[in-house]
Image (tube, rainbow, N blue to C red):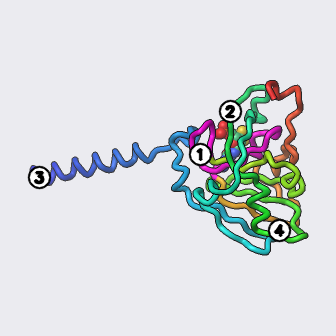
Amino acid sequence: MRKDVFAFLIIILLIGGTYLLARDDGNTATVEAPKELGVIQVTGLVERPYNITYDELSKLPSREVEAPLYCVGEPGKVRKNGTWKGVPLRTVIELAKPKSRAYKVALYASDGFTTDLYLDAVREDEDIIIAYEFNGEPITPRIVAPGRWGYKWIKYLTGIELVSYDFTGTWESAGYPDDAYIPDELSPGR
Ligand SMILES: Nc1nc2c(c(=O)[nH]1)N[C@H]1C(S)=C(S)[C@@H](COP(=O)(O)O)O[C@H]1N2
Ligand SMILES: [Mo]
């Protein structure tokens, strides 16, 4: 009987410990598990759909971009600032050979969040990157879109889909501007 009680307590401790270790408040880069979080799928209007892993991403030619992150809900307040290292989104897209009908880039995250960018804008701006490091620390791949509101900076990126229609993401379809340009007066320090 004693042994049963002892075993029961051990099991409870193990379950509790696992829960505490696995807990993630979802907002702190350091508790994310960047390399474990699977692959990014590149799909849609492309000749060559493919999947890319964290390791493959980090072997492509990279850029470092200094850019502050502003949330549209708190304009004027820098939410994160520092050096983002990653691969231009256009590089990852061109590897899939977009068809000429491709017009927009739909971006998907593992938490259900979505956003979008115009393919032309992505092609023109090599500073729009899929970042996999922030201030030298690995992060779960996310978009960094300098000069645009935080809702374009999609985290936990799992899908890049080229589409020919006017796909709008979570905040864009709620009425926030699709271009998401931050007016100069709302982005001090830029
Ligand atoms: N997957 C995912 N990415 C997301 C969001 C989200 O809810 N889910 N929120 C966006 C918004 S509105 C902002 S302001 C920034 C905040 O980024 P941070 O959590 O790194 O500060 O993430 C963006 N990316
Ligand atoms: Mo935001």
Name the residue rendered at 74%, 26% in the picture: 77
Q: Residues within 10 Å of mark 4 (few under 14, many from 20)?
A: many
Disc 3 from disc 4: Cα separation? 64 Å
The secondary structure type at the circle numbered 4 is: loop
| x and y percentages locating residue 53 in the rendered image | 60, 61
Disc 1 from disc 3: Cα separation? 44 Å
Mark 3 vs mark 4: in front? 4
Q: Which residue is mark 1?
A: 139
Name the residue rendered at 67%, 65% in the picture: 41
Is 154 rendered above or below residue 188?
below
Q: Which residue is mark 2?
A: 82
For residue 98, the mark is: 4
Disc 1 from disc 4: Cα separation? 27 Å
Disc 3 from disc 2: Cα separation? 55 Å
Residue 139 forms part of the magenta stretch = yes
N-terminal-most mark, 3 or 2: 3
The quadrant where residue 56 appears? bottom right
N-terminal-most mark, 1 or 2: 2
Q: Amino acid at mark 2?
A: Gly
Mark 1 vs mark 3: in front? 1
Between 137 and 175, the residue placed more toward the observer is 137
N-terminal-most mark, 3 or 4: 3
Q: Which residue is mark 3?
A: 3
For residue 66, the mark is: none
